[in-house]
Image (cartoon, rainbow, N blue to C red):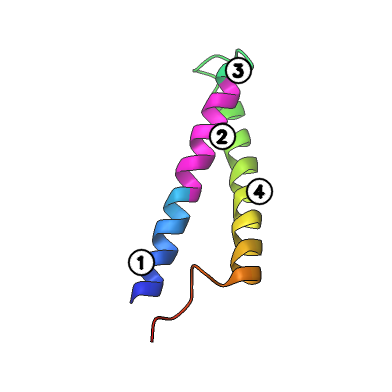
Amino acid sequence: MMVDLKKRIVIALILNLSLFSASVFAFVNNWEVSNINHLIASAFAVFIFMIFIVFILIKNHKILFAKNN
């Protein structure tokens, strides 16, 4: 039960961070707010990158999904 909660928290954090960093990237590059295609594309790229990083950390350290006995 707790593993599912940890997975949901990690996925929600990845989604929030990817959308936040994509919006910061869009404003730094002086994109318009109405140009949603660039925002979605950069959010998707950052999302894939963060999933890659998080799964490498989980595989190497096994901290997030360790069972509490």
Q: Which is nearer the N-term, disc 2 or disc 1?
A: 1
Q: In terms of secondary structure, what is the magenta stretch mainly?
A: helix
Residue 61 relative to residue 13: left or right: right
Q: Which residue is mark 3?
A: 28
> Residue shown at 44%/65% (left/top)?
7
Q: Which residue is mark 4?
A: 49
Give the number of the disc on residue 5. 1
- Could you say where residue 56 lies in the image, as x and y percent from the top left? 66, 63
Give the Cα distance between marks 4 and 1: 22 Å
User: Nearest the camera: 6 or 40?
Assistant: 6
- Could you say where residue 38 lies in the image, as x and y percent from the top left? 61, 27
Q: Is residue 24 above or below residue 1?
A: above
Q: Which is nearer the N-term, disc 2 or disc 4?
A: 2
Residue type at the position of mark 3 = Val
Q: How many marks?
A: 4
The magenta span reads: 14-26
Q: Which residue is mark 2?
A: 40
Residue 3 relative to residue 28: left or right: left
Q: Is residue 43 above or below residue 8?
A: above
Q: Quadrant of residue 2?
A: bottom left
